[in-house]
Amino acid sequence: MRPFVFVNVAASLDGKISDETRRQIRISSEEDLNRVDELRAKSDAIMVGIGTILSDDPSLTVKNEKLRARRILLGLQENPVRVVVDSRCRIPLNARVLDQRAKTIVAVSKIADKEKIEGVKKKAEVLVCGDEKVDLKCLLTHLKEYGIKKLMVEGGGTLINSLLAEGLVDEFYIYYAPVMIGGEKAPTICDGKSFAEKIKFKIVSIEKFGDGFLVRAVPLVSR
Ligand SMILES: NC(=O)c1ccc[n+]([C@@H]2O[C@H](COP(=O)([O-])OP(=O)(O)OC[C@H]3O[C@@H](n4cnc5c(N)ncnc54)[C@H](OP(=O)(O)O)[C@@H]3O)[C@@H](O)[C@H]2O)c1
């Protein structure tokens, strides 16, 4: 058993989610940022890979005060749980995601440095799943046991690739901004290795959204 897993990313028309610097760049419009905030507020947890933490240092919290207040009214924590997929426990101890605004789970593998784990444990919960890479199925099973029913994945492309390859994605939202970023080495929605067999999707909807458009699609291999 695992949570319902959905991915949300903002991309350029050429499918890039950042440029060659791999730093966070503004791709979303204001309207899209509000839509993402709503999705966050309706999720039990938000997950990213360590690449995203090292590049962007996101706080992964709900920005809109009213949305946070609504969560409290519903008997929830102000912010969803934050989950970082980090085999080697490379997360900086001053990462924003380790602040006290929400609970954080750092998922590591058996190769992670024990001393570093002890440091992270002072700020977050550490879950050991997998021998080298984080075993995503093991992680999702644990998250379900923690009571996480709806998990939002915000990237990056390497983590998304693994989740898709293992059939662990139920739904996909891509906001396409009307820009091209270019760059052979710029990260894309789905990096990592090409799939042995291409993954097919059913398009649920395509809507014009602000200046760009929003695609909602369902992979046909999730399990
Ligand atoms: N536009 C957007 O919506 C958006 C959203 C998020 C990120 N981004 C951009 O995406 C880029 C970061 O993406 P990224 O692909 O470099 O990093 P990522 O997907 O955030 O993290 C990938 C890392 O996670 C770790 N990991 C551990 N177990 C894994 C597993 N089973 N499968 C996959 N990864 C696993 C690996 O590092 P270890 O082996 O060291 O654990 C891996 O290198 C940045 O440029 C950021 O700005 C854009």
Image: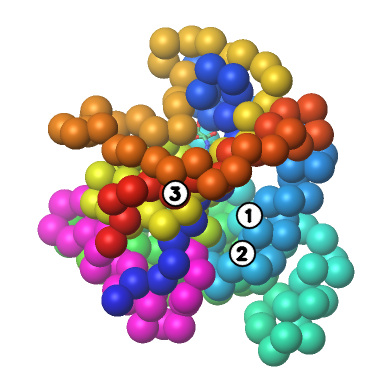
- In-image side of 128 versus 23 (left or right): left
Splitting the image into 4 quarters, where does residue 121 fall?
A: bottom left
Vertical side of 47 occupied by 156: above or below? above
The residue mark sitting in front, 2 or 3, is: 3
Which residue lies under the disc numbered 1? Answer: 59
Give the structural element (helix, strand or loop) at label 2: loop
Label pair 3/1, CB-CB below 8 angstroms: no
Q: Which residues are magenta?
A: 130-151
What's under tag 1, amino acid-wise?
Ser
What's under tag 2, amino acid-wise?
Asp
Label pair 2/3, CB-CB below 8 angstroms: no
Which residue lies under the disc numbered 3? Answer: 218
Mark earlier in primary sequence (3, 1): 1
Residue 99's tag is 2
Q: Most extreme residue toward the top, as rendered?
A: 183
What's under tag 3, amino acid-wise?
Val
- Indicate the position of residue 7 as horizontal and vertical percent values: 49, 50
Structural distance between the alpha carbons of marks 2 and 3: 33 Å
Q: How many marks?
A: 3
The residue mark sitting in front, 1 or 2, is: 1
Give the structural element (helix, strand or loop) at label 1: loop
Can you see residue 19?
no
